[in-house]
Structure formats: structure tokens, C-alpha cells
Image (spheres, helix red, strand yellow):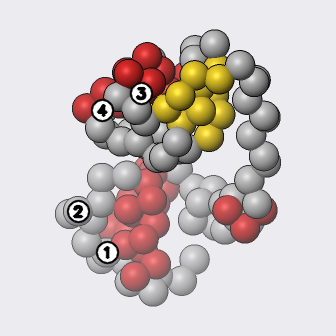
Amino acid sequence: MAIHVLEDYRGRQTQERVIKAGMYEADDPALFGAAAYLVANGVAVETDSAPEPSPLPDKSELPDKADPLITRTVEQLTALADAHGVDLTNASRKSDIIAAIRAADVVT
């Protein structure tokens, strides 16, 4: 069975993870097992047509692999931040650490 998700959905059924509007197979992992729930609650409708393959992301949406911060490990970023006195109190993810380093204008 295929379903057409009519609008982006986020809620308890997906542990607040977003399901983007579009066509999906009912067993698609991107639905987090919520296909029947979405249909029952009017967020999606069943359809006979198979979903189209997802388009490749625009290159502008992909991380720049040449960026010296993105290619470093969390441990390397933490060491860099410590060496330059960057406050990482609220940085819980790699992207948070990179943002803190960039905000501090650390030259890499």
C-alpha cells in the first residue's frame, strides 16, 4: 500500500520527528511506523500509485566537505574550542560546537 501524506506531520506518534508531505510506501522507514495512524487521522490518504523516488538534494543543501570544521571530529573541535576559550556550555551536538567556534571567529 502506498500513502500520500498531505502535509508535514510532527507529533507523539513520531516522537516529534517530521514526516514531510509526499508519497510513501506504507512500510517506508521515513514514516516511523505511523502510516495507519496518519491515514486514520486524515493527515494522509491511501493511494494505488507507487511513490516517485526522492529527488537528490540540491548541492547547496549539502555540507561543504572542504570546510575544515565539518571534517573534524567532535574531540578535535572541542580541543580547538578549549584552546581558544570558546564557551561550549550549550553545545550538545557537533553542529552546536561548530556554531560556537564560528561565532567566536576562531581562525582555522
| Left or right placement of residue 48 versus residue 76 in this view | right
Q: Amino acid at mark 4?
A: Gln
- Residue located at (63% from left, 28% from top): 24
- Which of label 1 and label 3 is nearer to you? 3
- Cα separation, mark 3 vs mark 2, equals 35 Å
Give the percent coordinates (x, y) of residue 14: 35, 30
Q: Are marks 1 and 4 in contact (CB under 8 Å)?
A: no
- The local crowd at label 1, few if under 14, some if 14 to 19, many if 20 or more residues have their Cα within 10 Å, is some
What residue would you read off at disc 3?
A: 38
Residue 13 is situated, as x and y percent measured from the top left of the image, at 31, 27
Whole-angstrom CA distance, mark 1 to mark 4, is 32 Å
CB atoms at circles 2 and 4 under 8 Å apart?
A: no
Residue appearing at x 30%, y 77% in the figure: 85
Look at 41% across and 42% down and name the residue there: 9
Q: Residue farthest to the bottom? A: 105
The amino acid type found where label 2 is placed reads: Asn
Examine the image and state in which quarter residue 5 appears.
top right
Three-letter amino acid code at the position of disc 3: Leu
Q: Is residue 86 left or right of residue 58?
A: left
Residue marked by disc 1? 86
Dot 1 or dot 4, earlier in sequence? 4
Res 65 → quadrant = bottom right
Q: Which residue is mark 4?
A: 15
Mark 4 neighbour density, 10 Å: few (under 14) some (14–19) many (20 or more): few
Q: Earlier in the sequence, mark 3 or mark 2?
A: 3
> How many numbered marks appear?
4
**Disc 3, SS:** helix
- Residue at 74% over, 53% down: 57
**Pointer 4 or 3: first along the chain:** 4
Q: In front: 76, or 19?
A: 19
Q: Left or right: where does residue 20 sit relative to residue 97? A: right
Q: Which residue is mark 2?
A: 90
